[in-house]
Image: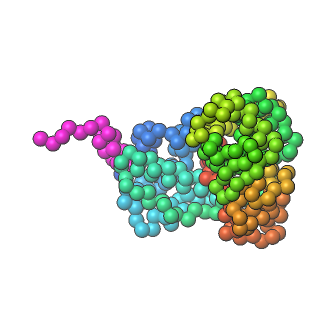
Amino acid sequence: MPPEASPDYDDTRLLLHALRRYDLDVLLTRLGPSSTHPRAAALQYTRLLPFFSTARLEGTDFQRPPASFHLWVNHVALLGEGGRPVKPNTARARISALHLLYEGLIDRGVLTANPLRGLQRPPQERTSSPPPPAGEIQALLQASRRQHALHAALTLLYHHAFRLEELLKLQWQAIRLNPGEVLRAHTITRLDDPSVQSLLRWQAHSGGVFSDPQARVFPYETPAALRQAAYLASLDAKIRLFPLRELRRASLRDFPHTSESAGYADDQSGFQTALALAQGVAQSLGLSEKNMRDSDTDPADFSDTPEAT
């Protein structure tokens, strides 16, 4: 007699059946949202719907996609209402949602490979608006001082141009508060005094020198969780909360950075481009997308995405 099917096997079979039938409702219900934010599930559905609607009409196979799948994904990602293309950042967010869906199916044993790996996404849209005013940033920092984790996180974002994902992955073992250094992806950054003091206060509150070296420095699981904490502080500061990713550009505008202090690679190209973008002169310099590779190219996150469609 064949062995009795396990619950995991039944779940895998159900997910595969839903993928073949373009049943987005079942897929997202079984896999769950990619974030705990209350808008995450609805936004995930909205971003994936163009792919599933078009695939159903055209008979595109999500399980065994054709050789032209990357071209098809980029085409569908740009489809908007009335035949007008959506903004590049919206297309990138849609592709990210499809990528995460495939990763979820791999984790459940439904698929063995992600067909989106190696896909060239639309170039990231560069904002022409200035970063948030320094006065509003200072008001937010002041309002967060009693929340030691939040204050330290915002200080590092602003004073040392941290990326959100880089910040949330940071471990205590990467930080030496005496003499005040942090190991980053591309370099070692010497921390300024406000950053060291904010981290010392947070470390003392969270366990002092007995903190687990491999523990993450900050308690926020996602950018949305950090944004929620910052939003509450913005109410105290009586300001409208700006996208936290903009603190990176504001940092390059407001502080006399070197590539090391801002966490950039040693080749200087990405750092110089980011400085130009922060100062609003990138277009006049005629810089190429290749030279922008080390500027703020974080994956699209719904909590800070310019357009949520």
Specify whether residue 110 is in view.
Answer: yes
Total tally of numbered discs in the picture: 0
Q: Which residues are magenta?
A: 1-19
Q: Main secondary structure of the magenta part?
A: helix
Q: Residue farthest to the right? A: 135
Specify whether residue 40 is in view.
Answer: no
What's the residue at 56%, 35% (across, down)? 36
Q: Is residue 190 above or below residue 33?
A: below
Q: Residue farthest to the left? A: 1
**Quadrant into which the N terminus falls:** top left
Instruction: Determine if the magenta segment contains residue 68.
Output: no
What's the residue at 79%, 67% (across, down)? 283
The quarter of the displayed image where residue 233 is located:
top right
**Residue sitting nearer the eye, 2 or 261:** 261
Direction from residue 92 to residue 283 in the image, left or right: right
- Residue 70, percent from left and from top: 49, 64
What's the coloring here? rainbow
Q: Is residue 157 above or below residue 7?
A: below
- Residue 68, percent from left and from top: 45, 68
- Residue 201, percent from left and from top: 74, 32
What's the residue at 38%, 45% (across, down)? 108
Direction from residue 108 to residue 76 in the image, left or right: right
The quarter of the displayed image where residue 58 is located:
bottom left
What's the residue at 81%, 70% (across, down)? 285
The quarter of the displayed image where residue 126 is located:
bottom right
Instruction: Determine if the magenta segment contains residue 15.
Output: yes
Direction from residue 253 to residue 293 in the image, left or right: left
